[in-house]
Image (cartoon, rainbow, N blue to C red):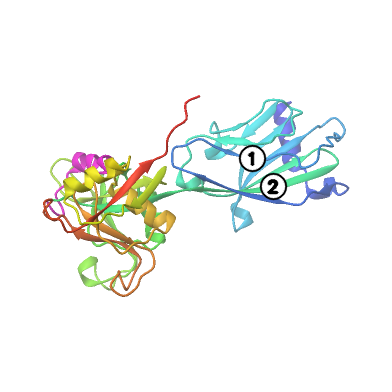
Amino acid sequence: AVQVFFLLLASLSQTDFCHISVMPTTKAKILASPGANVTLPCALLSKDTVHFGSIGIRIKWTKVADDEALNEDVLLSMGFHKKTYGRFDNRVFMETEDPDSEDASITIIDVAPEDSGKYRCEIMNGMEDTVQDVTLEVQGVVFPYSPNVGRYNLNFDAAVKACTDQDAVVASFDQLFEAWRGGLDWCNAGWLNDGTVQYPITKPREPCGGSNNRPGLRNYGQRDKQMSRYDVFCYASALEGDFYWLDQPNRLTFDEAVQACLDDEAEIAKVSHIYAAWKLNSYDRCDAGWLADGSVRYPISRPRKNCSPTEAAVRFVGFPDKNQQSFGVYCFKAQKTVSR
C-alpha cells in the first residue's frame, strides 16, 4: 500500500491540482559548516489546513538544479508515510512526526559541500500550495600548506598532523576540484585525503605541468604514504568566531604576539583562520602579522598597489626569526558556547 501511495504521489501533475491557488514563493538562505546537521525551514503560509479528500497534507522536497533534468528528489511525505531518495536516504528527516502539522521543515545530517544548492519545499493541503525555496551554502576553504622547514617535507601522516594543527583536515579531491573551479592556482603538489598527490592549475605554464596542457588538476596518483614527501592541501570550515588584526603601538616578536592575543582574551590566529576570513568573509588588510605556526601573512581581497596588486590572495611573507620585532599579529576569538 505504501509503494502504491508513493507511485500515486509521484505521478500527480500540476494539472491534477489546477483548482489550487499557489501561494507566493518565499526564499531563505542557510549557512552551514561541513559535517554539521542543518535544518531547512518550511511551513504553511496559511493557517487554513482544509484537506483534499482523504489524501491530507502532502510534502515534497527537491534539490533544484539549473537544468530541470538534473533535479534530485529529496523527500516525499504524506501522513505517516515518508520516503527519502538517493544520497539523501537515511540523512534527511522531518522535524515533526505529526502528520497534520503545518511544519514541513527537514534536517539534513552530516552535510557536505556537494549538498550546497537550492532546495524547494512544496506543501499541498487541498486548497492551496505553499512553495518555498531555501538555499543551503556549505562553507569551507582549501589552502595549500608547507611547514617552516620548506616545501616537499611532509609524508602523509605529517600532512594530516599539519592540517590538524591548523584546525583543518586534509582536503578531498572534490574539495580541491571545487577550489580549482573557484580559481585556485598552485604549482606545488600536495597530499589529498585519498593518498593521491595533486595540484590545481588555472593558468597553464611550463614549470607547472607544461604550457600546452589544459587547466585542471595535475595528478601524480597514489604515492607511498611513508616515504614520499610533498606539501598538503588542507580544508577548513567557516569561522566560528572572530578573526581580527590586533592594534598595537609597537611591532612584536612572536612570543609578544602570542601574549598580546591572550591579553585580549583571544588566541593567536592559525593559517586556517586567515584563509577562511579572506575567502569566506572577504577580509582585507595590508599588514603582515604573526600566525600561530610562526609564519607571517596578510589577506588581500581587494588587490591594489603595494598590496598584492595583481590578485586577491593570502600573501605569505615567510617564517622569519621569531625574535624579530618586525610584525603585528592576527588574533582569533572563538564563539562562546552557551550551556543549557
Percent from the top left, x then y, of residue 5? Answer: 74, 32
Whole-Å distance between the Cαs marked 1 and 2?
9 Å
Question: From which residue to which does the magenta span run?
Answer: 149-166
Compare marks 1 and 2 and give the one earlier in the sequence. Answer: 1
Locate residue 337: give its quadrant: top left
SS for dot 1: loop
Percent from the top left, x then y, of residue 335? Answer: 42, 39
Q: Relative to the observer, which residue lies in front, 229 or 335?
A: 335
Name the residue carrying label 2. 132
The answer to whether residue 142 is visible is no
Task: Kindly indicate whether the residue at mark 2 contacts the one at mark 1 (C-beta within 8 angstroms).
Answer: yes
Label 2 amino acid? Gln
Whether the magenta-drawn stretch holds residue 152 is answered as yes
Q: Is residue 33 left or right of residue 7?
A: left
Percent from the top left, x then y, of residue 137? Answer: 51, 49
Q: Relative to the observer, which residue lies in front, 207 or 316?
A: 316
Whether the magenta-drawn stretch holds residue 40 is answered as no
Q: Is residue 79 above or below residue 23?
A: above
| Image quarter (top left, top right, bottom left or bottom right) of the N terminus | top right
Q: Is residue 225 above or below residue 208?
A: above
Label 1 amino acid? Pro
Q: Which mark is residue 41?
A: 1
Q: Relative to the observer, which residue lies in front, 271 or 65?
A: 271
The answer to whether residue 264 is visible is yes
Q: Residue furthest front?
A: 249
Q: Relative to the observer, which residue lies in front, 109 or 76?
A: 109
Q: Residues within 10 Å of mark 2 (few under 14, many from 20)?
A: many
Q: Residues within 10 Å of mark 1 (few under 14, many from 20)?
A: some
Q: Is residue 27 above or below residue 187?
A: above
Instruction: Kindly identify the residue that appears in the image at 79 percent across and 44 percent down.
Output: 129
Percent from the top left, x then y, of residue 238? Answer: 42, 46
Instruction: Kindly identify the residue that appears in the image at 85 percent across and 46 percent down.
Output: 20
